[in-house]
Amino acid sequence: PITAKRTGLKALRTWNWDSAEEFPLPKGAGPKGPGDVNVSHTTLSGNFCSARHCFARGHAGTISPICCGNRVEGAATPVPGGKAHRIGYWIRPLEPRPVEVVKTVNTRFVAVKAAAVVAVLCSLQMEAVAQWVWSPQIGQFINLRNLPRETPELQIEHIRGLMLEGDYREALAETDLFTQYYADTEYADENQFLRGEILYRWGRYHRAAQEFQQVVTNYPASDLHDEVIQRQYDIGDTLYEEGLDRMDRRFAWFRTQPLRQAIEVYNMVIDNQPFTEAAAEAQYKVGRCHQALDEYIEAAYEYRRVVEDYSGTEWVPDASHGLVESYYASTLPPAYDQSPSRLTINAIEDFTQRYPGDERVDELEEKRREMRENIAQQRLKTARFYEKRRQFDSAHIYYEILVDEFGDTEAAESAREWLSEHGDQHQPFAEHLGGL
């Protein structure tokens, strides 16, 4: 094989010329394949060829040391009986060997790059060493970067500065550092409050409420309790509004989570100040959360607590109205149990008696008539059931109950018609009771 290396390239090309064929070059055409080689000289070496490529085997002499302007690393061995090729012909190897690529390395660039890496590593090592100092008090090395400010007051100010800059993650880490070194100081409750404040501004509302609660639990003598309660109220309201918005969406991840978290936060307020106006408001809002979750029995229970436990607060009218709404939302059609309908009627009568001038009385009166009609329709179905079974005495009793207790309903009109047709044939309800 002939080996040649073109000047300025990074590839070493080797061809196997054991078998080759010669073909004419059409006018204006180039090589026919990647291994085609132009032969422009005819007899002996020593001349410069005008071909664009390299040398070929099979000449009648030795190939020129310089061919096509490129230095030839080896020389061809003359082949016995070899023939000279004419100018303008190309020779093609029938079985070319694959091209081998030899990459060259720029040693100067590598040296500069290695020196830069070493310099960076040395600087990092020097910086790391500079951060570690010996502490005679504890008898070991300590890292200065893991130490708080010189005093707890300075550490608090540093945390507050990070929070105001919006670097909440770093500020929260600094509160942990404060707890590690200054947990027994007079600023410990303020550090705990800052933890809640950082999470609140960060948008982590539920976790912030829990951190605020730690101020009340761990520091009962702190003067930050009022601020804690206010923050918890704000968090509860935020979660409640977020929960209502998420419940309105048809497809949403964790639709009920904000409302349930709001219930938990409001209960924190109630536990922290159980006999205050703030607790009454939180109790009412717990009922609103359950109502938004369609948990009407739980909502009615929470509203009832406001009416009974905080009867002197301004939240009683709204809680009484919420009680009506919860009972009304849990009612069923006449074919089912009408206990919720009776509870709704009782709640409406109680509300209208307590607040006769309230603007919501007319609306509640309409719901009261609806509930009475449902109960009356159920009584009518029961009377007709006994009538079909030919138990006329029992049917007579239910028809009379309809007329006596629900005389203002449509079902009572049907009962009056039946009694007018069959009343003389059966024992009157009053006489039946007297016989018992």
Image (tube, rainbow, N blue to C red):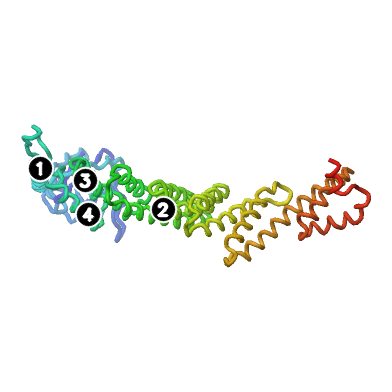
> How far apart are labels 2 and 4 at the CA level?
31 Å
Closer mark to the observer between disc 2 and disc 1: 2
Please name the residue that numbered disc 4 is placed on: 160
Is the C-beta separation of discs 2 and 1 under 8 Å? no
Is the C-beta separation of discs 1 and 3 under 8 Å? no
Measuring 6% from the left and 36% from the top, which residue is drawn there?
134
Amino acid found under the numbered disc labelled 2: Thr
Looking at the image, tell me whether mark 1 or mark 4 is earlier in sequence order. 1
In this image, 340 relative to 373: left or right?
Answer: left
> How far apart are labels 1 and 4 at the CA level?
25 Å
The numbered disc on residue 131 is 1
Looking at the image, tell me whether mark 3 or mark 2 is earlier in sequence order. 3
Residue 197 location, x and y as percent? 30, 53
Looking at the image, tell me whether mark 2 or mark 4 is earlier in sequence order. 4
Residue 286 location, x and y as percent? 48, 51
Please name the residue that numbered disc 2 is placed on: 276
> How far apart are labels 4 and 3 at the CA level?
82 Å
Looking at the image, tell me whether mark 2 or mark 1 is earlier in sequence order. 1
Amino acid found under the numbered disc labelled 3: Ala
Please name the residue that numbered disc 3 is placed on: 56
> How far apart are labels 2 and 1 at the CA level?
53 Å
